[in-house]
Image (cartoon, rainbow, N blue to C red):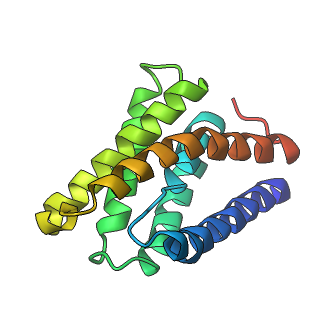
Amino acid sequence: MLKLWKFQISLFGILFAVILLEASIIPAAWAPLRVDFFIGMIIGQIIFVPFSQGFPFVILGSLILQAFSGARLGLIPLLYIFTFMAIEVLKNLIYLENAYIQASLGVLFYCLIAAATAFLTDFAYLKGITVPLVVGALLTGFVSPMMAYVVGRLQMAYELEYE
């Protein structure tokens, strides 16, 4: 049980580092750019961690992300819970352990989250930021397999076995 707590605390530590990167370092380089590292962590949770531990992590992680965003209350958790559930369903249809599929899912869900945000808030959100959205989608696709790999390495480091 102690290993499980260490694993979850390590995941939250990585999440806080990612939030620091997403909220301060990337916008300092290019203000409209948004790279979503959390999608890769969700994919890693689905591949390596059982639903009973992955789903609470996604809920708590999305609530933490909500605190650092300017979005409406509850919008970020809604979108990430939808992402988790959709990938959980896709887990039975496609092989998620392939890096190309993880990258494709990262790009797809980044675009879906951006479209849902624009639809639920205001379509003026998309005006003039097409290039940063495309670059953000591609970078999210690039980062998603790496984040899934980090989750898998943490699971192996703490010697957690799930059936």
Q: Residue at x 87, y 45 (%)?
A: 157
Res 49 seen here: no
From the viewer's perspective, is 102 left or right of 146? Answer: left
- Quick one: 88 or 68, which is closer to the camera? 68
Q: Residue at x 37, y 57 (%)?
A: 132
From the viewer's perspective, is 92 left or right of 86? Answer: right
Residue 48 position in % (x across, y down): 66, 37
Residue 96 position in % (x across, y down): 54, 26
Above-or-below relation of 98 to 88: above
Q: Residue at x 73, y 65 (%)?
A: 9
From the viewer's perspective, is 147 left or right of 159? Answer: left
Above-or-below relation of 63 to 94: below
From the viewer's perspective, is 90 left or right of 115? Answer: right
Res 128 seen here: yes
Q: Quadrant of residue 117?
A: bottom left
For the N terminus, which image quadrant? bottom right
Q: Quadrant of residue 12?
A: bottom right
Q: Quadrant of residue 105?
A: top left
For the C terminus, which image quadrant? top right
Residue 66 position in % (x across, y down): 42, 74
Residue 82 position in % (x across, y down): 34, 49
